[in-house]
Image (cartoon, helix red, strand yellow):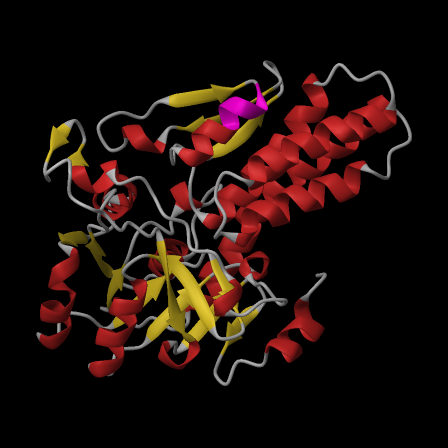
């Protein structure tokens, strides 16, 4: 089952509400752009590739529900919806990429009906392509894993962070399909526990051996020789850093200290060729995420909280970046990558 998709019968976006995992698998239907924006802000849908598709589907949804009678007014409605969606989460580049791709395609249309058709067709195409790209990332990345490897991962870069299959976890799935015996160690990924709630749930669904650890256990398991490779996803890749879930930078330092390969798995849509790390706004989440665990208060309500959602891992800590086009090794030449792959 896809984590996010379009429902032709109800003319709406349907997605798995990831805040309900692992206890319940609840399907959420978004019939309006505001509902989708809330789902993105509250992490009911999350993960860079999934957000790219969500952005594209959101623009297509705006086109379908608009009451505009002319092409110009319809495009204005779609651009207004695009701005609402852009403002939900600032760090991951895929969201804006998906929005821009569908808008650009729709603007070719010269009638209301054609604009709607182009927008929805492009958004659906993006969803299908995301699955294909993840499979390609998995095939390339599987070559880096050996039979018997234990892979440490952080947050969730699996099918719940994509439309299906996954990036980091897609590599694990592809290696297992090749007959390799792979085990996974998953960090809990505080404060919202995407690792314990979602990654472990995904892997258990597929009967893939997984062990859950606290975030603070990473040094111990690496020092004890329990980890062979580290694979994480990415929310934005710039020339000098990879932005991913908070804690990734720390993980890269510990891996480098112990000589453990640190791999990043991401589609080319996660690359930002125009900015550097200092240009990127890191999203800060609500203090309540640290003060409460579910409905249970776990910190004084008056305590000051700093809760960034992402951090930046410098390129010198990264052993390779695995994309749908192949494996990129350092030194990472962004100009070369842009010339070879952008636009494909």
In this rendering, would 36 be left or right of 80?
A: left
Vertical placement of residue 221 versus 5, above or below = below
Say whether residue 29 is magenta: no
Residue 337 appears at what percent x and percent y? 63, 74
Q: Can residue 1 be seen in the rendering of this structure?
A: no
Vertical placement of residue 307 versus 279, above or below = above
Vertical placement of residue 250 versus 130, above or below = below
Q: Quadrant of the N terminus?
A: top left
Q: Residue at x 69, y 45 (%)?
A: 100
Residue 322 appears at what percent x and percent y? 47, 68
Q: Quadrant of residue 170?
A: bottom left
Q: Residue at x 22, y 49 (%)?
A: 190
Q: Quadrant of residue 295?
A: top left
97 and 130: which one is in front?
A: 97
Total tally of numbered discs in the picture: 0
Question: Is most of the magenta stretch helix, strand or loop?
Answer: helix
271 and 246: which one is in front?
A: 246
Q: Residue at x 22, y 68 (%)?
A: 148
Residue 252 appears at what percent x and percent y? 29, 72
Q: Residue at x 21, y 74 (%)?
A: 254
Question: Which residues lie in the magenta part?
Answer: 32-36
In this rendering, would 259 be left or right of 239?
A: left
Q: Can residue 298 be seen in the rendering of this structure?
A: yes
Q: Quadrant of residue 219?
A: bottom left
């Amino acid at each position: 089952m896809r984590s996010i998709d379009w429902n032709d019968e109800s003319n709406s976006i349907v997605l798995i509400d990831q805040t309900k995992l692992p206890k319940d698998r609840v399907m959420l239907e978004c019939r309006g752009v505001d509902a989708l924006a809330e789902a993105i802000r509250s992490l009911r849908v999350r993960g860079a590739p999934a957000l790219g598709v969500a952005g594209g589907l959101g623009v297509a949804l705006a086109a379908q529900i608009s009451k505009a009678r002319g092409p110009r007014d319809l495009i204005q409605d779609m651009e207004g919806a695009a701005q609402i969606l852009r403002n939900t989460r600032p760090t991951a580049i895929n969201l804006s990429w998906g929005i821009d791709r569908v808008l650009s395609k729709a603007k070719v249309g010269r009638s209301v009906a054609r604009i709607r058709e182009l927008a929805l067709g492009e958004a659906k195409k993006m969803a299908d392509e995301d699955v294909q790209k993840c499979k390609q990332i998995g095939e390339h990345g599987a070559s880096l894993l050996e039979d018997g490897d234990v892979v440490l991962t952080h947050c969730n870069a699996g099918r719940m962070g994509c439309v299906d299959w996954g990036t980091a976890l897609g590599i694990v799935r592809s290696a297992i399909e090749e007959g390799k015996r792979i085990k996974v160690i998953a960090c809990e990924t505080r404060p919202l526990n995407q690792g314990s709630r979602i990654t472990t749930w995904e892997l258990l669904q597929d009967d893939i051996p997984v062990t859950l650890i606290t975030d603070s256990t990473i040094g111990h398991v690496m020092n004890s020789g329990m980890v062979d490779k580290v694979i994480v996803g990415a929310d934005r890749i710039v020339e000098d850093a990879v932005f991913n879930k908070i804690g990734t930078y720390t993980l890269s330092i510990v891996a480098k200290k112990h000589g453990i390969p640190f791999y990043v798995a991401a589609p080319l849509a996660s690359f930002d060729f125009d900015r550097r790390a200092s240009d990127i706004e890191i999203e800060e989440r609500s203090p309540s995420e640290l003060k409460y665990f579910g409905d249970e208060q776990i910190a004084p309500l008056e305590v000051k909280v700093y809760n960034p959602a992402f951090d930046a891992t410098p390129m010198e800590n990264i052993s390779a970046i695995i994309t749908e086009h192949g494996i990129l090794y350092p030194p990472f030449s962004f100009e070369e990558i842009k010339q070879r792959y952008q636009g494909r």
